Amino acid sequence: MSAVESFIDYKAKTGMQCGSYSIDLPPLKENEQYRFHFDATKCIGCHCCEVACNEQNNNPAQIKWRRVGEVEGGEFPNVLQMFLSMSCNHCVDPACLIGCPTNSYIKFDNGIVFHDDEACIGCQYCTWNCPYDVPVFDESRHIVTKCHMCYDRIEAGQTPACVQACPEGAIEIEVVDTQKWLEEDIDKEGNAPFLVDARLTNSTTRITLPQNMPKELHPMDEDLIKPAHKEWPLVFMTVLTQVSLIGFAALFLGDIAAHFTSLPKPSPLMAFVIFALAAIGLPLSALHLGRPFKAMTAMKNLKTSWLSREAAALGAFVAGMGVVAVLYYLGIDGFVRIALEALTLAVGFYGIYAQSMIYRVPAKPTWNRVTTTYRFFTTGYIGTLILALLAIAQHQINVANILLAISILLGAAQLYLFWESQRFYERIDPNNPFSYQIERSARLLRENFKSLYDFRKRSLPLAALALPLLAIIALNAGSMGFGFLFTLLAVALAFASELVGRLLFYSSAIKTGMPGNFFAGSQRP
């Protein structure tokens, strides 16, 4: 007899209330599915549901498919301590399924959202996408796992382990008419304090809350802020591919300009260096995966996944740049090369746009802004700095001046976006439904990452504006040596600044999820 069954047997003998051992659900009709019902007026915060879930599914202690959170509020003597127990909400429009690049999520006919472990590559995109923080990355298995409502037990006529183990009967399995739920009941019974609006993914979980709750509630863990994962492979991959794109755009424009002006044609070295940046950067993304050798399967879901679109587009972009670099080396120019450059550039622009859309998800409020897309494109000012450095080395002073001027324009845009983000964190709108997460992200930048944030603040104006401007002045004063030195310093400082900025982008992103969840173990944020 398992520990769960022993506990149930003990409760039966002692008369303790508990969830039903057997399940008696009617056959599902059209538009119906199974769902959880959680009654917060019954939950006592014992965490039996967490323990039972882990035991039933053989999960280690740090993996939580069901989690219990805690909020409190009110003034003595009218105070409230409330617990929330939540697992997968088996949404009508699950964000995990829509965003998964490998089609590892399946929504069964009975409404259960099931994760196919074999197909998973451990990209963890679903852990960013789900606004309830439900999917969990299991480092020991190198994949993401999640609640499947103990579907095998339901098929055998038994309730899920969490339902069975609850001593107060706070968790139940129900049948819901999804059409009626979405049209009439979701706004009244689908929401709870500090959880996102249930309509965001059309969650099906029914939640019963206490009556006359205090107006102000606070998660019990509001003073505990854990930085998000650093994602070093993605830091380098995103920066290098973005730099390569803008560098390639400058190469393309230079190739066109050379046909209509006296400017020299871009050199094979320029084409190769710009290609090498993305050729090195793109494969680094595989190091982020739990199963890097299955990276190619990330392109399976082009229909709905931005990650699949990014992988396909940037893969084609790098391949196209490789062919262009060969054409430069062979001295083949004219219409064929320009046409291939134009096509490659268009694919590359879409690839970086898709890359930005990966991060514009409601579950990560500091990412979910149009400025994320702008920042990804303007990071490429480093690409024009690199080409300017090569142009100076090849004594192409006029070309270097043009490239440095373009770099200053793009760098100024990047600097403006940084200042805009500062104002965003300083003037948090209390009416913003995600102000809680944004304020915590701001605290991370001010406290945990203060030295890195200060470096970013001081280095960006130098790298984006001051040093390129000094390089232009030096070149036009006839000092090619100082022009080269200032440009080299600009390239080095710009890379350092953008890598730090991207590290902060990942590390300070607080996502939505369960409030007051003290016992999340080592679950990756």
Image (cartoon, rainbow, N blue to C red):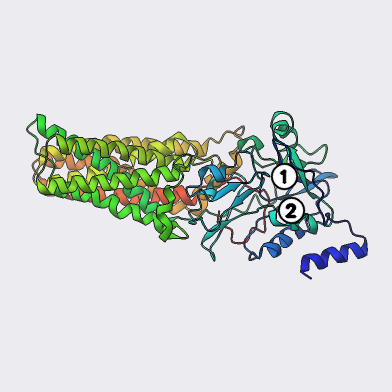
Circle 1 — which element? strand
Q: Which mark is residue 154?
A: 2
Q: Can the viewer see residue 454?
A: no
Cα gap from disc 2 to disc 1, whole angstroms: 10 Å
Which residue lies at the image location 20% right of the left edge and 35% below the top edge?
Answer: 339
Query: In front here: 153 or 390?
Result: 153
Q: Can the viewer see residue 460?
A: yes
Query: Which is more N-terminal, label 1 or label 2?
Result: 1
Amino acid, disc 2? Ile
Using a 10 Å C-alpha cutoff, classify the residue at mark 1 as few (fewer than 14 neighbours), some (14 to 19) or many (20 or more).
many
12 displayed left or right of 353? right
The image quarter containing residue 210 is top right
Query: In front here: 106 or 309?
Result: 106
Circle 2 — which element? helix
Q: How many marks?
A: 2
Q: Residue 231 in the image: x percent, y percent?
A: 45, 55
In which quadrant of the rendered image does the N terminus lie? bottom right
Which residue lies at the image location 35% right of the left edge and 55% below the top edge?
Answer: 283
Q: Residue 95 in the image: x percent, y percent?
A: 56, 42
Question: Which residue, given by chain and number where applicable, does mark 1 sit on?
Answer: 34
